[in-house]
Image (spheres, grey):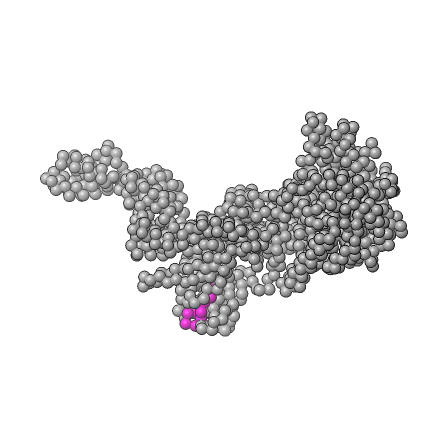
């Protein structure tokens, strides 16, 4: 009997018997103004099928023209990944039928990718506090176009099989994609799930720094396919792989690798063999299920796209683009740590939480470094854990975080109220200022309202008032507490203190 | 009024300019001629047109007359009507490519060639018949029935652009647009006694030309005279940013090249006769006319030499790998999802089942044959042996042209091996049909320009034959110069156009 899909081997047992080989294919949706091969806006969403033209709709007679900005972005990504840039390369047609693909072929690149033979050093923190570095080799990064998006209506699964009918939105068709493919990542062992996660997180950080994509995994701007295979420990061979799609967060990358390692091991140890196939990750159950079978026999009948001329970036242009690259991640971290005055521990926690870019952007929006760190690694990290989403995918922007801190600095809210503002923004109630308004969170510093509460507190606590009159100013804390209680926390504590001292003529 | 339809486009342009006729009169005369000869109750109409746009053409003609009255004519051909092969998209006008799968489709956009015709003020009479998706040499593969050759209604008008050639030969239009993937402009020109030009690849925009084989397709003029072709080429040619393969350069005036050639002086021109394009399978009367044309050029001062292009013997095989490969991919988009025919099988069919049923019902046998061939040629494990190998031969053919043009200014051959054959004669023999394009295919594989000029009637059947002139890429002006010279030499000999010798078509 072979193991069923859901049988898993304990993780530690997997590692005793097998070596994992990882491979990651990441699709990055570029933020160019127009699509890969036509002038339509490269914005997904909005009214379905409004952002289309004869070319991206694949109408008879229409022809593609390469988006120069997309080529530029591809080259910059390639350079940042230490790739060689092709002196001459072509697009190719990948032929297969699917209703969301207008031409029934995808214009992609096949054996002549624009970027190839690169690498990225991925840092994984260890419990001992030392960073461990894995060099991930990049096989290629190539240009291609996105497909339309199908919506299957009716039936129980939301999948094409069993649906009553399907709708297709071609607004996404033709949006430029860069597909970044790693070589097999060997030797990561027990750290394979973390390496996979760290690779995707670091790649995203790089893409954001390059400014070539919004790079939001939850929005599908950055999509990771996880390839995994196991081989008997020490054999030095490569086993049969599965390709897991629909992995929409860093956490899911880690979990999917872990799950597939355990699932493969259970099957292999039971004498079974792995089916080479596409699998779907399910965030809710933490499992993968079988998708379409994908054998090497699948024949895309690639051939060079005859409607496009070769892309031949001049060496001068490539060097010019190299000059526009952001600094390398290691140097950047050292610089930021010095600028922000973070301790080693603070810096490692920030990086480990995937918050480096977020903190940087929050500081750029005006927040003090420690305040930015405090919110992202405190309140927001807590929320991301509770909700099971990555920090970057929380529905709040660095600018909004900076604004909330500004409200604290301006004494519109205090720290405690600020937490409620975060809650409101995350719940979609609007901007920080709107949340303060709607929820009535602004602290009261109006003397009229505060004065009455102060009078009440003095009247209710004559003993304390006497002590203060006698010069024991420290006792004012008790009265402030009473006022805050009456004002439900929304009082400006500093002003309350002043009023108390005034009224008691100290 | 009937005289107008027999005038050349250049003459019509002059008459319009002189105010002797109006575009509305001219357009109406051609529409009436179409009514009279294109469809007949006995089924023996020419059937050059799949769609006639009387209202649109007359409205465009009225606009042209108004422009001219204001002194704002847009160019010499403003107001001269034209027919367009149904493989180019026309905004608001049906475009079927001769296929059932596109029946009823009205494109939302104009091909660049069509847009340039409109900008230049040419009223579009309608869309002309063709072999389905331009696959064929006889127009018999049209899903809407064949076009007949005006010289003999029981014979084919050539293909795939038999509709455009027949429309011009039957005086239904003074000008037409064709497309040429392996000879679809030139071979119909040869068998209907008309002029056809395949420009340099990249010389005329392919945007809106429904692709048969993207690396071979090229749109071009279909006319009765070389000068008319040159004037039309000047209108439709030039760089188009929507077609990445379109050439960015300043082209010389082809009209001037044709006028210069009309002097008939060929001194200083070195002409190469391609030795491989003769022999078995070539009709004796066609070869006799060809030799006569060569002799005329010699008399006019040309130096003539024999040139061998050894790789040309592989051109047909190469073509029938590259063309189906590209076509099989191009035609994948005809899947019933977004436009055109949709056949829904019984029950609750999947999208894939709808695609299959639609393509089964919507494509004709020749299209299916080539999709199967192309799919096979691109398949993993066969790619190198077929598609890859074909690309290498293609390079060798280009080298043959390079070597030849290092020595001569132009190459010449008969355009087609035979005169027009009878309808149905080769329909069941694809190889015999394919052989018709033997002489025209090398130019498409190498991207060089070519013209077919009428050079008389074959002795044995009294049907027209064509003389092909090929020039190096970008040197389209040479085919106009030499073509116009030969035309002028024959005009002296014949005392009038060849088409004057065609039988008059019965009109109602």
Q: Is residue A503 left or right of residue A115?
A: left
Observer-nearest residue: A430 or A32? A32
> Does residue A86 appear in the picture of this structure?
yes
Rendered residue at 69%/41% (across/down): B252
Residue reaching furthest front? Answer: B268
Observer-nearest residue: A455 or A114? A114
Q: Position of residue A198 (x, y in %)?
A: 41, 58
Rendered residue at 10%/39% (across/down): A470
Numbered range of the magenta stretch: A14-22
Q: Where is residue B253 in the image (x, y as percent from the top left)?
A: 70, 39
Q: Is residue B502 left or right of residue A151?
A: right
Look at the image and tell me in which quarter the N terminus of chain B lies.
top right
Say whether residue A438 is magenta.
no
Residue reaching furthest left? Answer: A470
Residue reaching furthest top? Answer: B70
Q: Is residue B412 left or right of residue A387?
A: right
Q: Position of residue B33 (x, y in %)?
A: 81, 37
Observer-nearest residue: A383 or A67? A67
Observer-nearest residue: A417 or A377? A377
> Does residue B146 appear in the picture of this structure?
no
Rendered residue at 52%/67% (across/down): A240
How many numbered discs? 0
Which corner quadrant of the image does residue B232 belong to?
A: top right
Rendered residue at 81%/56% (across/down): B278
Q: Where is residue A468 in the image (x, y as percent from the top left)?
A: 13, 40
> Compared with residue B91, is residue B426 higher up or lower down, i.e. above or below?
below
Look at the image and tell me in which quarter the C terminus of chain B lies.
top right
């Amino acid at each position: 009997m072979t193991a069923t899909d859901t049988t898993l081997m304990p993780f530690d047992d997997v590692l005793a018997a097998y070596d994992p080989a990882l491979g990651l294919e990441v699709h990055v949706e570029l933020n160019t103004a127009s699509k890969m091969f036509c002038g339509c806006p490269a914005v997904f969403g909005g009214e379905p099928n409004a952002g289309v033209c004869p070319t991206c709709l694949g109408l008879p007679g229409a022809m593609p023209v390469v988006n120069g900005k997309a080529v530029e972005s591809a080259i910059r990504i390639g350079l940042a990944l230490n790739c060689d840039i092709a002196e001459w390369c072509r697009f190719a047609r990948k032929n297969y039928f699917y209703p969301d693909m207008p031409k029934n072929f995808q214009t992609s690149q096949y054996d002549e990718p624009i970027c190839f033979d690169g690498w990225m050093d991925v840092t994984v923190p260890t419990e001992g506090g030392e960073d461990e570095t894995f060099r991930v080799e990049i096989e290629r990064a190539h240009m291609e176009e996105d497909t339309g998006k199908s919506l299957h209506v009716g039936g129980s699964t939301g999948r094409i099989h069993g649906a009553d009918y399907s709708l297709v939105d071609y607004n996404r068709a033709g949006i430029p994609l860069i597909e970044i493919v790693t070589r097999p990542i060997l030797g990561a062992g027990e750290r394979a799930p973390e390496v996979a996660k760290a690779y995707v997180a670091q790649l995203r950080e790089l893409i954001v720094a390059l400014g070539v994509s919004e790079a939001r995994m939850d929005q599908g701007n950055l999509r990771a396919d996880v390839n995994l295979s196991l081989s008997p420990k020490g054999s030095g061979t490569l086993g049969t792989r599965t390709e897991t799609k629909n992995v929409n967060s860093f956490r899911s990358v880690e979990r999917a690798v872990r799950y597939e390692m355990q699932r493969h091991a259970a099957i292999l140890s039971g004498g079974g063999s792995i089916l080479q196939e596409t699998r779907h990750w399910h965030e809710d159950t933490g499992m993968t299920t079988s998708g379409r079978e994908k054998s090497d026999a699948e024949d895309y009948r690639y051939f060079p796209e005859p409607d496009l001329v070769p892309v031949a970036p001049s060496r001068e242009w490539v060097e010019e683009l190299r000059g526009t690259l952001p600094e390398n991640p290691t140097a950047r971290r050292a610089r930021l740590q010095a600028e922000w005055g973070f301790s080693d521990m603070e810096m490692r926690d920030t990086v480990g939480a995937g918050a480096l870019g977020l903190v940087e952007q929050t500081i750029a929006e005006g927040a003090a470094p420690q305040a930015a760190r405090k919110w992202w690694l405190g309140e927001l990290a807590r929320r991301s854990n509770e909700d099971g989403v990555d920090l970057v995918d929380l529905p709040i922007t660095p600018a909004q975080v900076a604004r909330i801190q500004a409200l604290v600095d301006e004494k519109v809210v205090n720290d405690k109220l600020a937490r409620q503002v975060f809650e409101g923004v995350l719940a979609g109630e609007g901007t920080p200022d709107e949340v303060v308004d709607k929820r009535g969170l602004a602290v009261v510093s109006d003397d009229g309202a505060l004065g009455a509460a102060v009078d009440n507190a003095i009247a209710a606590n004559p003993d304390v008032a006497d002590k203060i009159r006698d010069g024991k100013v420290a006792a004012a804390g008790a009265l402030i507490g009473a006022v805050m209680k009456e004002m439900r926390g929304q009082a400006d504590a500093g002003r309350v203190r002043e009023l108390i001292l005034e009224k008691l003529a100290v | 009024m009937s005289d107008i339809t027999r005038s050349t486009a250049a003459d019509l342009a002059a008459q319009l300019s002189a105010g002797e006729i109006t575009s509305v009169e001219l357009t109406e005369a051609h529409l009436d001629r179409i009514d009279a000869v294109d469809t007949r109750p006995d089924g023996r109409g020419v059937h050059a047109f799949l769609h006639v746009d009387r209202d649109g053409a007359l409205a465009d003609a009225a606009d042209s007359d108004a422009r001219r009255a204001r002194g704002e004519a847009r160019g010499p051909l403003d107001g001269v009507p034209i027919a367009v092969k149904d493989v180019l998209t026309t905004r608001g006008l049906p475009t079927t490519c001769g296929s059932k799968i596109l029946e009823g489709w009205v494109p939302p956009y104009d091909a660049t060639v069509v847009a340039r015709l409109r900008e230049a003020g040419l009223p579009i009479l309608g869309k002309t018949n063709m072999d389905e998706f331009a696959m064929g040499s006889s127009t018999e593969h049209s899903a809407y029935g064949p076009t007949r050759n005006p010289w003999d209604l029981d014979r084919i008008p050539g293909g795939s652009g038999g509709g455009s050639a027949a429309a011009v030969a039957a005086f239904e239009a003074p000008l037409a647009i064709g497309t040429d993937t392996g000879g679809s402009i030139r071979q119909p020109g040869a068998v209907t006694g008309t002029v056809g030009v395949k420009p340099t690849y990249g010389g005329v925009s392919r945007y809106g030309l429904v692709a048969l084989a993207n690396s071979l397709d090229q749109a071009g003029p279909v006319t009765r005279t070389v000068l008319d072709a040159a004037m039309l080429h000047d209108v439709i040619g030039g760089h188009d940013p929507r077609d990445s393969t379109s050439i960015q350069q300043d082209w010389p005036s082809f009209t001037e090249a044709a006028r210069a050639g009309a002097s008939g002086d060929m001194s200083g021109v070195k002409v190469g006769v391609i030795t491989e394009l003769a022999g078995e399978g070539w009709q004796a009367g066609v070869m006799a006319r060809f030799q006569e044309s060569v002799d005329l050029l010699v008399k006019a001062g040309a130096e003539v030499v024999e040139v061998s292009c050894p790789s040309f013997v592989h051109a047909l095989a190469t073509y029938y790998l590259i063309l189906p490969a590209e076509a099989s991919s191009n035609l994948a988009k005809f899947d019933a999802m977004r436009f055109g025919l949709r056949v829904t099988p019984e029950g609750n069919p999947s999208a894939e089942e709808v695609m299959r049923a639609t393509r089964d019902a919507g494509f004709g046998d020749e299209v299916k044959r080539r999709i199967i061939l192309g799919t096979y040629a691109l398949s993993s494990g066969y790619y190198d042996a077929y598609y890859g190998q074909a690309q290498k031969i293609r390079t060798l053919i280009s080298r043959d042209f390079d070597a030849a043009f290092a020595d001569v200014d132009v190459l010449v051959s008969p355009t087609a091996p035979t005169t027009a054959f009878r309808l149905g004669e080769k329909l069941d023999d694809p190889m015999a049909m394919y052989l018709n394009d033997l002489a025209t295919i090398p130019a498409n594989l190498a991207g060089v320009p070519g013209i077919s000029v009428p050079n008389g009637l074959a002795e044995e059947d009294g049907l027209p034959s064509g003389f092909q002139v090929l020039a190096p890429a970008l040197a389209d002006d040479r085919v106009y110069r030499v073509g116009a010279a030969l035309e002028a030499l024959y005009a002296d000999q014949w005392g009038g156009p060849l088409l004057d010798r065609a039988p008059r078509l019965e009109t109602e």
